[in-house]
Image (cartoon, rainbow, N blue to C red):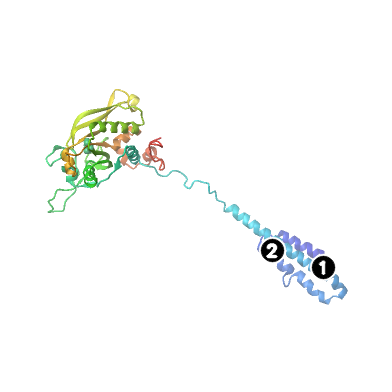
């Protein structure tokens, strides 16, 4: 009996998995197992022998069964531990191995400009990039014979054969959005209009597609003084400097009267632009008081309302702020350039959080 016990307790201890354990169970207490066969022999024993052997065999059977149950549980635990070990996953790892994309400097600067003007109460308006020559030219007091049409190197759309209406154009500036905004909202109004514009020109400082932001403020008593203050606030916030000096140079635009081009005081010491100090001037935009004919074209009575407008190159001010030397690189889709000059996707510029880092 002791030999039997030692043999099976040992075999149970040695079983490495459930199927070996099942073989041991069958060999010991299965129908034809060694212990079961022994129990069958009880019948042939004398009553005295049976009284000793019976309880002993039952005890052995119980002992083997509980050893089997304990081993089965231990094997299941070990199997679970093994699974937990091999299927382990660190949920605290970042979901992506590295930063994959970035915000293009043009998008970033558009957001910066929008944040600054929004803080001064300007909404954002958009218009179509393909527009009629009326919105792009006539409504802005640029009639058909006007030299500004030729100067703008306009891209014209094709009309179908026999269609003699004037062709649509790829808008040459964001100024047509002034007219669309006036038509839509009337006066008073305060908006900026950022977006892509097109001209047939290509060199280090010109690309056939580039970006502008238009500004428009119309009210009963808006003057050049308001324009000057708004632009000063903008330049300080955008270039992140406390002091700036603006120079208004008399100029001419068909859609403003009077008109001014605006320069900011700067220095280029060591090839590095510093805004607000130095002996150089940097032209950044065109502006003026909205021409009465333009207000009229937008459906606003020039005897009752007046306002200022300005137009600025987004790509240009992006190049100045972030030290980007060649305009054409903006649109080459060169990944190395995009990684170098791009911005992290979650660094949304705000006035309270900081425009740039
Ligand atoms: N539309 C002009 C351009 O593309 C820029 C401009 C100048 C816009 C003066 C204005 C303005 O609103 O008042 O060159």
Q: Position of residue 245 (x, y in %)?
A: 29, 26
Q: Is disc 2 placed on a helix, strand or loop?
A: helix
Rendered image quadrant of residue 139: top left
Sequence order check, earlier mark of 2 and 1: 2
Mark drawn on residue 29: none
To which residue does mark 1 refer? 56
Q: Is mark 1 within 8 Å of ligand 1?
A: no
Q: Pinpoint residue 100: horizontal percent, then vertical percent.
A: 42, 44
Residue at far right of view? 48
Crowding near pointer 2: few (<14 within 10 Å), some, many (20+)?
many
Residue lying at the far bottom of the rendered structure: 44
Q: Residue at (36%, 39%) from the top-left corner? A: 337
Q: Nearer the viewer, residue 297 or 277?
A: 297
55 left or right, relative to 77 = right
Q: Residues within 10 Å of mark 1 (few under 14, many from 20)?
A: few
Identify which residue is drawn at 35% across, 25% down: 270
Dot 1 falls on a residue whose secondary structure is helix
Q: Quadrant of the N terminus?
A: bottom right
Q: Is residue 80 left or right of residue 13?
A: left
Give the percent coordinates (x, y) of residue 286.
23, 34
Q: Could you say which quadrant of the image residue 15 lies in? A: bottom right
Residue 284 visible from this viewpoint? no
Q: Which residue is mark 2?
A: 21
Q: Quadrant of ligand 1?
A: top left
Residue nearest the observer in this picture, 94 or 242 = 242
Whole-number angstrom distance, CA of label 2 to CA of label 1 = 23 Å
């Amino acid at each position: 009996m002791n030999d039997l016990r030692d043999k099976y307790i040992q075999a149970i201890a040695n079983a490495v998995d459930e199927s070996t354990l099942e073989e041991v169970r069958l060999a010991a207490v299965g129908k034809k197992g060694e212990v079961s066969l022994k129990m069958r022999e009880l019948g042939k024993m004398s009553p005295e022998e049976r009284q000793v052997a019976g309880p002993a065999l039952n005890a052995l059977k119980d002992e083997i069964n509980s050893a089997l149950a304990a081993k089965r549980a231990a094997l299941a635990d070990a199997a679970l531990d093994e699974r937990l070990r091999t299927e382990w996953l660190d949920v605290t790892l970042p979901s992506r191995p590295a930063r994959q994309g970035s915000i293009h400097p043009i998008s970033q600067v558009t957001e910066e400009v929008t944040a600054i003007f929004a803080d001064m109460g300007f909404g954002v308006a958009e218009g179509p990039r393909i527009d009629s020559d009326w919105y792009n030219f006539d409504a802005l007091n640029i009639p058909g014979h006007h030299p500004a049409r030729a100067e703008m190197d306009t891209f014209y759309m094709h009309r179908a054969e026999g269609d003699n209406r004037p062709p649509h154009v790829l808008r040459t500036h964001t100024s047509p959005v002034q007219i669309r905004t006036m038509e839509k909202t009337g006066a008073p109004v305060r908006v900026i209009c950022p977006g892509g514009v097109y001209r047939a020109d290509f060199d280090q400082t010109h690309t056939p597609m580039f970006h502008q932001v238009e500004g428009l403020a119309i009210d009963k008593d808006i003057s050049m003084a308001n324009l000057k203050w708004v632009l000063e606030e903008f330049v300080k916030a955008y270039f992140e400097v406390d002091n700036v000096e603006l120079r208004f140079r008399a100029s001419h635009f068909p859609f403003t009267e009077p008109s001014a081009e605006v320069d900011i005081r700067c220095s280029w010491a060591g090839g590095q632009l510093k805004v607000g100090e130095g002996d150089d001037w940097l032209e950044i935009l065109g502006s003026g008081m909205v021409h009465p004919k333009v207000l009229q074209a937008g459906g606003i009575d020039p005897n009752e309302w007046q306002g200022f407008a300005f137009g600025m190159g987004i790509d240009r001010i992006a190049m100045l702020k972030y030290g980007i030397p060649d305009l054409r690189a903006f649109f080459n889709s060169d990944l190395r350039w995009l990684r170098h000059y791009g911005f992290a996707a979650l660094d949304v510029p705000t006035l309270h959080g900081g425009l740039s880092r």
